[in-house]
Amino acid sequence: MKILPLSDPQAIQEALQRAQRVLKAGGVVVIPTDTVYGLTAQASNAQAIARLYQLKVRSENKSIAVLLGDFSQWQEVAAELPKSAHKLAKRYWPGGMTLIVPKLETLPPEISHNEKIGIRIPDLEIIRELIRLTGPLATTSANLSGEPPAKCLADLPQSILEGSDLILDGGTVTGGIASTVIDCTEDPVRILREGALSPDAIFAEAAS
């Protein structure tokens, strides 16, 4: 079965174990998050990341962000954590906020074609548990580029349903709004995409 429900404790553990195996083998998995459904692959696997671009029909000039399972995992993908990023992470993670920080040089160039990378901790314990098992996951919203994000499996494009290796069905996600994206490599920080968090609150916290 390609679609696994996250409906009860036993089903969750079976789904997480299978997703871990698929991701470790270089597969692509659709997951629910606290904001929208996402397409994921191991952040260290260049070929798997290339499939994310293909399935989403995404320009390879656009970077793909990384989801973390806990705060300590930033060291696996980022060269450093600027002071502003540290403050914002402590205040708003887990949650709908992606921080742009200096990228670790050992990451595949496919994930980002510059020296920066976006990182986030989702506010969904099931997915954080998965990422603690697999390590950081390159993640992009599970929709075709330019189309609305998916809040449930019925919103997923047929090409993504068929092209992914595994789908975790978490029902309808509660957020539905993409994360706020903040570039913390600049001082003051710069909001690249407005989303779930208030810009005023972000600027106030980063400058405190």
Image: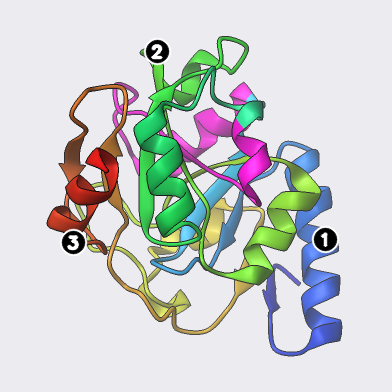
* Res 89 label: none
The Cα–Cα distance between marks 2 and 3, rounded to whole angstroms, is: 27 Å
Looking at numbered disc 2 in the image, what kind of residue is underneath it? Glu
Quadrant where the C terminus lies? top left
Task: Mark 2: give few (<14), some (14-19) or many (20+) Cα within 10 Å.
Answer: some
Of marks 2 and 3, which one's residue comes earlier in the chain?
A: 2
**Residue sitting at the far bottom:** 8
Quadrant where the N terminus lies? bottom right
Task: Mark 1: give few (<14), some (14-19) or many (20+) Cα within 10 Å.
Answer: some
* Pick the front one: 208 or 36: 208
Of marks 1 and 3, which one's residue comes earlier in the chain?
A: 1
User: From what the image shows, is residue 204 above or below residue 122?
Assistant: above
Residue at (31, 51) in percent of width and height = 144
Colouring method of the image: rainbow
Q: Secondary structure at mark 1?
A: helix
Can residue 53 be found in the magenta stretch?
Answer: yes
Of marks 1 and 2, which one's residue comes earlier in the chain?
A: 1
Q: Which residue is mark 3?
A: 198
Mark 2 touches mark 3? (CB < 8 Å): no
Looking at numbered disc 1 in the image, what kind of residue is underneath it? Arg
Q: Provide the residue span drawn in magenta.
A: 46-74
Q: Which residue is mark 2?
A: 115
Measured as percent of width and height from the top left, residue 147 is found at 22, 57
Q: Secondary structure at mark 3?
A: loop
In which quarter of the view is residue 65 placed?
top left
- Depth check, mark 1 against mark 3: the one in front is 3
The Cα–Cα distance between marks 1 and 2, rounded to whole angstroms, is: 33 Å
Q: Which residue is mark 1?
A: 18
Measured as percent of width and height from the top left, residue 55 is found at 44, 44
